[in-house]
């Protein structure tokens, strides 16, 4: 049941009406039932895995909380570490078996074959449980938060199960911390017109990003990246830039729809994107892109490793470990590992070059606050991000190398001989795609300094409703068309 389906629209309307009709003390029961139904619409059997993760982390929280009350500090710490270890071992073992076993099995086979000592390891043929990386990380963060005494263990299993399975953000985030979301299930949410309207506006903007922009860009991206040997130069460059906006709009759309759906019912989910392509460095990019995942790695991996409080060499090591793990989190292929490694390497090189940049700025008296310098930083960062996206999107490492090799090719004639219109998109759709990206950039720029939903609510009622109806018309007219892609598949479902 995808967010941009008629089934979800009906589901959400029913869930919301019943939610507000019920007494607030039992609403969590309705949301828990609805959330499990939502998840089971993909594959009912895999709800068992989510339930196991829920029960394991729930029990670990109670046991850690109990250990916190022991008078013997040494014994308390030992028990707490044991329960955390068991919670992580069970949850990560499930994640490993369903997401990474075949990758590691085939990798070991390749290593032995390379040394002429072939072995054959078993492999498993099953679908990756949707959203498993998201809800596993969310559940594990609860275990750590109880261990650190950031929160007290939740005694109500049902409410904790709702925290793990809350349907708006279950499949692709945002990855919520227990201290941000869990307490909200005890709050009394009354119907508020302004809040509901703002939530619906966020949903509408998410649908525009997904259906009008991302899905249209996907057609050209798929055409080129599925057959990289057939294209060169500007064709590949255009597909790569389009993919940068496709994946942003696709993932940002899911997060915005999730936040909007939650807001309609009175819940506050974390911001997951903050105009990332306006970043002036890779480090800044990761403060704006998939913010909740970045915060998870910061709090539960980077800081425990020592962060930047160790030697310079150890600091670089910590950065590389975090981004290698981030790459592996995204997918069980070497392409994702390389993608993560590149972002780590970018940051290490950027830090190493700081003295040189500082010297150049001083020698040539460059005004770092000038618009041209900031634009230069944004464009360089965007180019580096795009290069890394090649490995993220390419079907294999070989395909990525072909794309990199073929992209360095000067063929401006594609814009004049009509070849540019043979990439899956007709001329009107290509023009619409470029215009959409321009509008997206404008909206993202305004979002950095303004609350657009609040400003919209202050407009004249005629103007305001004209905007609402225009947005709906854009979705209906430009968001439903064309073969060659799965319109209900969000890219981050595979993670």
Image (tube, helix red, strand yellow):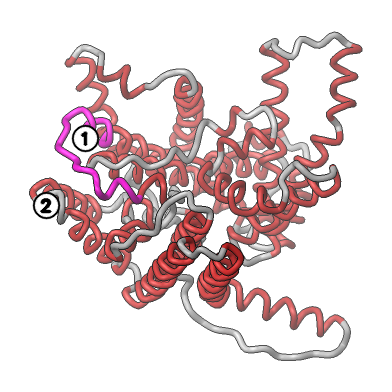
Q: Camera-side residue: 477 or 100?
A: 100
Left or right of 237 on screen, residue 22: left
The magenta span reads 182-200
State the image coordinates of residue 209 (x, y, percent, origin top left).
41, 38
**Identity of the residue drawn at 59% across and 32% down:** 277
Residue 92 placed where, x, y %?
55, 70
SS state under label 1: helix
Q: Residue at x 22, y 31 (%)?
A: 197
In the rendered structure, find residue 18 and report the number of the disc placed on it.
Answer: 2
**Neighbour class for label 2 at 10 Å: few (<14), some, many (≥20)?**
some
Q: Are marks 1 and 2 in contact (CB under 8 Å)?
A: no
Badge 1 crowding class, 10 Å Cα cut-off, few under 14, some 14 to 19, many 20 or more, is some
Residue positioned 86% across, 36% down in the render: 352
- Can you say whether 334 is above or below 478 in the image? below
Q: Is residue 461 above or below residue 357?
A: above
Nearer the observer, 288 or 410: 288
Residue, disc 1: 196
Q: What count of labels does the image hold?
A: 2
Residue drawn at x 64%, y 33% as measured from the top left:
284
| Viewer-proximal residue among 18 and 109 | 18
Instruction: Look at the image and tell me whether residue 325 can be seen.
Output: yes
How far apart are the two marked residues, 1 and 2, measured between alpha carbons? 15 Å
Is residue 130 among what the camera can see? no
Can you tell which quarter of the image residue 120 is in? Answer: bottom right
């Amino acid at each position: 049941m995808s967010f941009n389906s008629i089934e979800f629209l009906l589901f959400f309307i029913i869930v919301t009406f019943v939610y507000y009709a019920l007494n607030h003390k039992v609403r969590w029961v309705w949301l828990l039932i609805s959330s499990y139904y939502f998840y089971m619409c993909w594959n009912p059997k895999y709800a068992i895995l989510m339930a196991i993760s829920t029960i394991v982390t729930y029990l670990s929280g109670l046991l850690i909380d109990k250990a916190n009350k022991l008078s013997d500090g040494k014994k308390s710490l030992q028990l707490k570490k044991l329960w955390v270890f068991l919670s992580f071992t069970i949850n990560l073992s499930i994640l490993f078996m369903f997401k990474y076993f075949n990758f590691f099995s085939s990798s070991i086979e390749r290593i032995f074959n390379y040394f002429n000592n072939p072995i054959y390891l078993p492999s498993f043929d099953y679908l990756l449980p949707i959203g498993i990386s998201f809800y596993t990380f969310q559940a594990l963060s609860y275990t750590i938060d109880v261990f650190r005494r950031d929160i007290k263990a939740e005694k109500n299993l049902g409410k904790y199960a709702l925290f793990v399975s809350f349907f708006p953000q279950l499949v692709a985030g945002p990855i919520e911390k227990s201290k941000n979301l869990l307490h909200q299930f005890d709050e009394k949410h009354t119907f508020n017109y302004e809040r509901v309207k703002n939530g619906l506006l966020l949903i509408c903007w998410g649908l525009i990003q997904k259906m009008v922009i991302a899905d249209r860009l996907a057609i050209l991206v798929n055409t080129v990246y599925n057959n990289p040997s057939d294209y060169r130069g500007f064709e590949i460059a255009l597909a790569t830039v389009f993919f940068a906006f496709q994946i942003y709009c696709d993932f940002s759309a899911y997060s915005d729809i999730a936040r909007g759906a939650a807001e309609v019912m009175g819940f506050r989910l974390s911001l997951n994107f903050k105009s990332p392509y306006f970043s002036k460095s890779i480090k800044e990019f990761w403060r704006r892109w998939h913010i909740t995942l970045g915060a998870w790695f910061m709090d539960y991996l980077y800081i425990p490793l020592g962060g930047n409080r160790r030697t310079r060499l150890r600091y670089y090591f910590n950065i590389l470990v975090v981004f290698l793990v981030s790459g592996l989190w995204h997918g069980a292929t070497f392409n994702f590992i390389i993608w993560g490694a590149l972002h780590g390497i970018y940051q290490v090189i950027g830090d190493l070059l700081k003295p040189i940049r500082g010297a150049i700025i001083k020698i040539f008296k460059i005004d770092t606050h000038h618009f041209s310098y900031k634009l230069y930083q944004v464009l360089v960062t965007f180019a580096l991000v795009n290069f890394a996206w090649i490995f993220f999107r390419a079907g294999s490492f070989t395909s990525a190398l072909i794309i990199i090799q073929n992209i360095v090719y000067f063929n401006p004639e594609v814009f004049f001989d009509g070849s540019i219109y043979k990439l899956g998109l007709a001329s009107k759709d290509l023009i619409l795609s470029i215009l959409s990206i321009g509008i997206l950039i404008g909206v993202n720029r305004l979002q950095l300094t303004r609350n657009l939903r609040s400003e919209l609510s202050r407009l004249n009622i005629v103007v305001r409703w004209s905007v609402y109806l225009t947005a709906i018309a854009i979705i209906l007219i430009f968001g439903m068309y064309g073969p060659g892609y799965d319109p209900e598949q969000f890219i981050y479902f595979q993670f």
